[in-house]
Image (cartoon, rainbow, N blue to C red):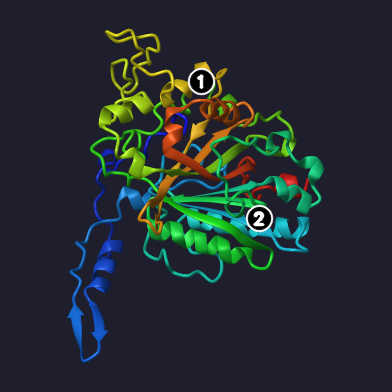
Amino acid sequence: MPDQSIPEARTSTEVSQASPPSGLSRRALLGTAGATGLVLGAAGGAVGYAAAPAPATPLTSVGSDRAMFHGKHQPGITEGLQACGHLVAFDLVAGAGRKEAAALLRRWSTTAERLMAGEPAPHDDTDVARDAGPSSLTITFGFGHSFFGRTGLEKQRPAALDPLPDFSSDHLDKARSDGDLWVQIGANDGLVAFHALRAIQKDAGSAARVRWQMNGFNRTPGATAHPMTARNLMGQLDGTRNPKPTDADFDQRIFVPASGEPAWMANGSYAVVRRIRMLLDDWEKLSVPAQEAVIGRRKSNGAPLSGGDETTPMDLEKTDAKGDYVVPLNAHARITRPDKNGGAAMLRRPFSYHDGFDADGTPDAGLLFICWQADPLRGFVPVQRKLDRGDALSAFIRHEASGLFAVPGGAAKGEYVGQRLLEG
């Protein structure tokens, strides 16, 4: 988990307080529905429980915030972290090829545009998100290595999409890795995100089947007094050194240039997706100072162990009274620094996950790691190789699934995502 992050989405306290809209708000409607109560039946009798109605409040910025579907880049890359996420991969069914894939991407793009605007799905809407606003919903589409063989487009497959090398820390489940097509869904409301997931799955119809699906979450916007770097399930501020859209070289690092190859990937990016299980029982046995030594940063505020605050440059040469480096040589934050990896950088935009417990009570929890870069061979791969050779954090994590996907640039008005590939 390289030491980079994207700031959380803005909090509701940063948004001016608009006056309540006319009519009933979503919460008021939900509150009215909740007041009908829940009746639980049991043999010999029934017990009734009346749920208290939620207070009536206007649709807040959490619900009204909207991301745009059409643009230079696809949504879901540079936006702030969202509270809820779903990652899902599909495989084209036997007999489905380029024609069926084009029709599917056309359907998916139409559905994504409508849902991101807070509108119902174009057909057979489930009403799951009725009364909710867009809630910063983003839907992002990508192509896996196998997609090009299934559609007869091998000559259009980018060299950057070559399979990732094996890493010693990998314990990969092939059934939960890779896939012909990949969809990333994020929103600041759980029902809005699930609504999009169901709509995308239904749109797949007879053309594609789900290969794997993972669910994640982040802190809800407005849960902290001010915007801050997100925390992961280890309690650490996760990713202080993420590239920022305001950086002069941001586009160069993250997006394929307009003149890049292949031409259909212009303004696109490559997403590396890794399901990283955190061995939380072992991690939580460490003292806080021991945890900080593994990461190289203070748990409380993300400041480097060499001093300062979260944004203070790390002093890798600083030593203590014994002559030992204050930031240990195998500290995660030291190893992942771009200046120690030939300038390699990636935009991390992860979700945490919790999928219950193993039979022995061990939590199945960790990070759905998603990183974006113009070329994974210059972004993710060199950093992960370095981590593989001696990262202190490796003893407390396990890479359990992996995927690499080519995410084309955004669709112009009237186009669908991937049109330049599928109709070029």
Q: Position of residue 57 (x, y in %)?
A: 23, 57
Residue 377 appears in the rendering:
yes
Residue behind mark 1: 338
Q: Is residue 309 above or below residue 203?
A: above
Residue 255 position within the rendered picture, expressed as x and y whole percent measured from the top left: 60, 31
Q: Hey, what amino acid is under mark 2?
A: Leu
Report x, y in % for residue 390.
49, 25
Among the two numbered marks 1 and 2 on one chain, the one whose residue lies closer to the N terminus: 2
Q: Nearer the viewer, residue 180 or 153?
A: 180
Label 2 sits on residue: 105
Viewer-proximal residue among 55 and 309: 309
Q: Is residue 392 above or below residue 196?
A: above
Which is closer to the viewer, label 1 or label 2?
1
- The three-letter amino acid code for the residue at tag 1 is Pro
The secondary element bearing badge 2 is classed as helix
Residue drawn 35% across and 37% down? Answer: 230
The number of callouts visible is: 2
Helix, strand or loop at label 1? It is: helix
Would you call the spot at circle 2 few (<14 residues within 10 Å), some (14-19), or many (20 or more)? many
Q: Quadrant of residue 378?
A: top right
Q: Is residue 111 above or below residue 262?
A: below
Pointer 1: residues within 10 angstroms few (<14), some, or many (20+)? some
> What residue lies at 51% left-to-right and 40% top-to-bottom?
370
Residue at left offset 60%, top offset 30%: 381
- Label 1 – label 2 distance at C-alpha: 36 Å
State the residue lying farthest toward the front. 360
Which quadrant is home to the C terminus? top right
The answer to whether one can see residue 352 in this image is no
The answer to whether residue 275 is above or below residue 57 is above
Q: Which mark is residue 201?
A: none
Front position in the image: 127 or 212: 212
